[in-house]
Image (cartoon, coloured by chain):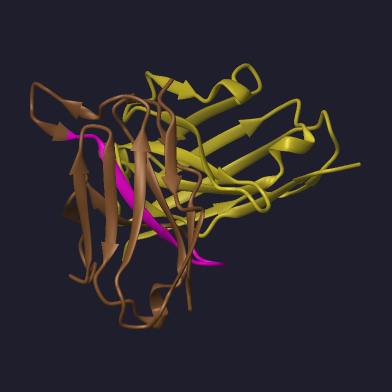
Chain colours: A brown, B yellow
Amino acid sequence: DIVMTQSPDSLAVSLGERATINCKSSQSLLYSSNNKNYLAWYQHKPGQPPRLLFYWASTRASGVPDRFSGSGSGTDFALTISSLQAEDVAVYYCQEYFSTPMYTFGQGTKLEIK
Amino acid sequence: EVQAVESGGGLVQPGGSLRLSCVASGISFSSYWMSWVRQAPGKGLEWVANIKQDGSEQHYVDSVKGRFTISRDNAKNILYLQMNSLRAEDTAIYYCARDELWLRYWGQGTKVTVSS
């Protein structure tokens, strides 16, 4: 089974500063036949359902602000917020779908304002 | 309008059963796999189960195999999760979501509490 490990578990960043969340998989998520990384990112705020941010590791979902970016390949991935806004406070999760049709989430990273 | 609304959660004793429903609209329900995902109190997201467009294929996380059954009614745009032999560790908010490999459209969730 693929294990997804996020770091850090929690992060406090000042408004306007950069925030980076890392996600590491126990095996490569890069599928050689299509050269795509089978990884998604979600934002989850209290009392709301999770929101898809990225799929294929770096393809931004509809409506996601461009201050958010997804990067990485193989086993190491990152979600970056270039200039943190107050509304970005949330828990962020990576999810692998290389094991499709079964999936695994990372444990989550809680992002707060410093 | 894109919408998915879960229902059927509640308080149940250990060993009991519940059936969750997810009524979908505006998400081309019958054309996509659908998934259930849960979040236990103070914990992260956990994928629980999914089902193919025509219902011919279902998959489950190991911890619910043999106890939970996912099904769907494409004529009514409803996704179900039958949960039997419930345990305290099944206590969670359960979400349905459209499954495209990634999970794009999510419902608001329904809360299940397993306790005596």
Locate the N terminus of chain A by quadrant: top left
Picture layout, residue B111 above or below residue B88: below
Picture layout, residue A31 above or below residue A71: above
Residue B115 in the image: state x and y as whole percent: 85, 43
| Closer to us: A2 or A64 | A2
> Residue B35 lies in magenta, yes or no?
no
Direction from residue B115 to residue A112 in the image, left or right: left
Residue occupying image coordinates x 48% and y 79% = A114
Count of picture labels: 0
| Closer to us: A50 or A87 | A87
| Closer to us: A82 or B71 | A82
Direction from residue B61 to residue A61 in the image, left or right: left
Direction from residue B44 to residue B50 in the image, left or right: left
Residue A5 in the image: state x and y as whole percent: 44, 39
Picture layout, residue B10 above or below residue A75: below
Residue occupying image coordinates x 47% and y 46% = B96
- Residue stretch rendered in magenta on the structure: A37-48
Residue B56, quarter of the rendered image? top left
Residue A95, quarter of the rendered image? top left
